[in-house]
Image (spheres, rainbow, N blue to C red):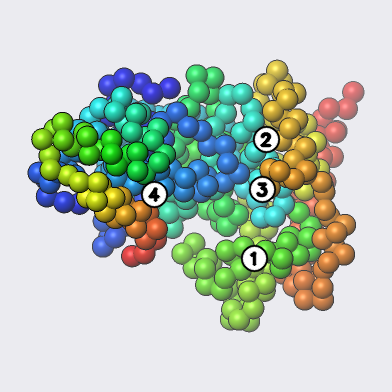
Amino acid sequence: MISDGDPFAGWIPLFLSARKGQPAVDWAYMGAERFIDPFCFDTLQRLAQRPFNRLFRRQTGLDVLRQRLRSHPGLPLRGMVFHMSRCGSTLAAQWLAALPDSVVLSEPEPVETVLQWSAAAEGDADTLSAVLSALGQPRRDSDQSLFLKTDCWHMVHIERLLAAFPGTPWAFVYRDPVEVLVSHRHMPGWQLVPGSMGCHGLQAPEAVMCNPLGHGAWILSVILQRAVQAMGRHPNGILLNYYELPQALEIRLAGHFGIARDALGGPELRAVVGRHAKQPHAAFQTDAADKRARADEEVLSLAARWLAEPYHELEKNAQQLAWNASYLTAP
Amino acid sequence: MTGAPDAPIQVLRQMVHANPALQQRLFAMVDAGEFSVAVCQLAMQAGLAWTEEDVLQAMRIGRRAWSDRKLT
């Protein structure tokens, strides 16, 4: 897929920076390699460590990135996956990556950087599109579609993302908040660090600033609230609860993202739903009962205080959509 | 990514960035030792005075730029 005559053929934006207010793009050579790790970070980290990229990386301004959006637009974005973390979204991304004609960007750091920048300046829709375009070049002859799985806190930027990619279908993956908090208790996510989300305009109340799990619960509550709002504003969204996985990927997500029926059912897809998304050597199995059994008083209290209400709002919304769908398809 | 325009590293980068086949060949080398030998040979062919230690030092700077990328 490396075309002749293009000086950036095979190169991708490794990271973006804005030292002294000057935005810059550091490019790394990726050649014909693919994004197949559970997270883009793993791929980018590996590329950054290759001897070639330690010596021959190149740096440009944003202008080159934007020009390439016109000259090399890359694959069309066919779907975006938002989520609340620890809810099966990585399984969804890995399932999409196993399609024979897709490129999946799972929580790409360059997108995180642009979303930290002002939407009225360097972080505008043009830059967002340009970053996705440069990362989303076809990597195989068969590649036709691009999918983006965002970081969980990017739900607060859904308006910016849909402005950059109008009409793109999207999904929100979520899960019983008690189970999500138990997962974060066991292995804390970045959003548990008090103050870590200030760069995304999320300032938690003082009451939770000394309590990492409480801070995480508050961040998750905002994510759920934004999902409720987005479902009301943007008709191209669907809700996927963890307990519907993995069957809902083929039954609901595929149709929503316009994935052809003949692309489904291959051995690669079956292999993905049979293994753990973040630990590929382990088998996938639902662990809802185990997580609920491990919920302590603090988890139950934080879930009730911050998350029960928006979660039930989403569930009501999902039930209404399911009823509408069955009504419309009834004979 | 900095340096005087005619510094050996800058000349080498220009050569490599203009040559897709060379990019593919050097990218395929995952061993730093093998890579630095290949780069030194390239420098020699171009009449540039560059040692393996120069290559390894430039690679250390490149690695630090990645690890420090979020520092402002």
Q: Name the residue: 21% across, 33% down.
A: B42
In the picture of the structure, the residue carrying the numbered disc 2 is: A95
How much space separates mark 2 and mark 4, taking CA atoms? 26 Å
Q: Is residue A139 visible?
A: yes
Precedes in sequence: disc 2 or disc 3: 2
Nearest to N terminus: mark 2 or mark 4: 4
Q: Are marks 2 and 4 on the same chain?
A: yes
Q: Position of residue A125 (x, y in %)?
A: 41, 44
What residue is disc 4 on? A15
Label 3 to label 4: alpha-carbon separation:
23 Å
Element type where label 3 sits in the image: loop
Disc 2/disc 3 C-alpha distance (Å): 12 Å
Q: Residue at x 34, y 29 (%)?
A: B25
Q: Position of residue A14 (x, y in %)?
A: 40, 45
Is A330 left, or right, of A39 in this rendering?
right
Amino acid of disc 1? Pro
Residue A87 in the image: state x and y as whole percent: 72, 52
* Secondary structure of the residue carrying numbered label 4: strand
Q: Earlier in the sequence, mark 1 or mark 3?
A: 1
Query: Which amino acid, by three-letter code, is at mark 3?
Result: Lys
Return the residue at label 3. A278
Numbered disc 2: what chain? A
Left or right: A125 with respect to A316? left
Label 1 close to label 4 by CB (< 8 Å): no
Amino acid on which the number 2 mark rests in the picture: Trp
2 vs 3, front mark: 3
| Quadrant of the snapshot with the N terminus of chain A | top left
**In-image side of B50 versus A15 (left or right):** left
Chain under callout 4: A
Q: Position of residue B11 (x, y in %)?
A: 15, 39
Disc 1 + disc 3, Cβ < 8 Å: no
* Residue to which mark 1 is pinned: A188
